[in-house]
Image (cartoon, rainbow, N blue to C red):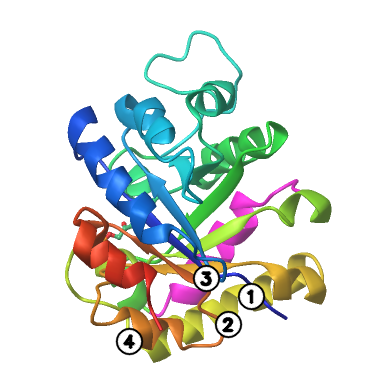
Amino acid sequence: MQRKPLIAGNWKMHLTIQEAVALAKKVAASSQGLEDREVMIAPAATALAAVAEAVRTSPVVIAGQNVAWKEQGAYTGEISPLMLKDAGAKMAIIGHSERRHIFGEDNGMINQRLIGALTHGIIPILCIGETLDEREEGLTWEVLREQVRGGLEGVSGEQAADVVLAYEPVWAIGTGKTASREQAQEAHQFIRGLIEELYQKKLAEQMRILYGGSVKPDNVDDLMRMPDVDGALVGGAALEADSFDRIIHFS
Ligand code: 13P
């Protein structure tokens, strides 16, 4: 089963519009002609439209860093799936650990966001991952099970075919402490098993599972060599054109 690798940059709360456009143009140049892998970037909301315009003639896909479940209305601070599409985004990161742990988003809310995205043809990247305490207490599998089941509650097999998952152990995000390739593989294999339980083997084999958490030029090749690692969700190293270029060109 061939799953096309996806290298995704999450720019988080960084870059002015001007800086974002300049970096996006470099990413577009890096991605020109690549057919065996996909490249995505998720700029801050303020830069979405300008970045989408800057990469319009390249294969780079644009994503929102989150998405609301309603089309419009009194939801101060939120961005609707229609607004994301209007700005040029085709994907949305949902349930990032920073949304879960800093802003208190739970599996129920994340599930609503995911369904909102799917309803409007936005491809969701559903992020899951355990904290260090949870790992040390032996709760990793239970947490992942809850996050996968909760996030995909009420999602049909047909809809789930569009979903991308991202395993981001919280202890590896922004810490410089990457999961070993064996730890990543073990978690990805477990997650694929959960998808098979919830849906079918075929869908589980088709679903892309990205790894995120201190992915850098010097560890990406090792991680991407693992059979169930189908891409990377990159934070810090995506903010610098040269390091992201190296990650895009993993071997
Ligand atoms: P870092 O690559 O900076 O660890 O961030 C990972 C991440 O949270 C991507 O969504």
* Quadrant of image for the C terminus: bottom left
How far is the residue under mark 1 from the one under mark 3?
14 Å
Q: Which of these two is toward me, 73 or 207? A: 207
Numbered-mark total = 4
Q: Amino acid at mark 3?
A: Glu
| Tag 1 residue | 192
The yes-or-no answer for disc 4 within 8 Å of ligand 1 is: no
Residue toward you, 248 or 120? 248
- Measure how far apart labels 3 and 2 are at the Cα level: 14 Å
Q: Is residue 11 visible?
A: no
Q: What is the distance, in whole Å, between disc 2 and disc 4 at their CAs?
A: 14 Å
| Classed neighbour count for the residue bearing mark 1: other residues with Cα under 10 Å, few (<14), some (14–19), many (≥20) | many
First of labels 4, 1 by sequence position: 4
Which of the two labelled residues, at mark 2 and mark 4, occupies the earlier sequence position? 4
Is residue 150 magenta-colored?
yes
Where is mark 3, residue-wise?
142
Q: Which mark is residue 180?
A: 4
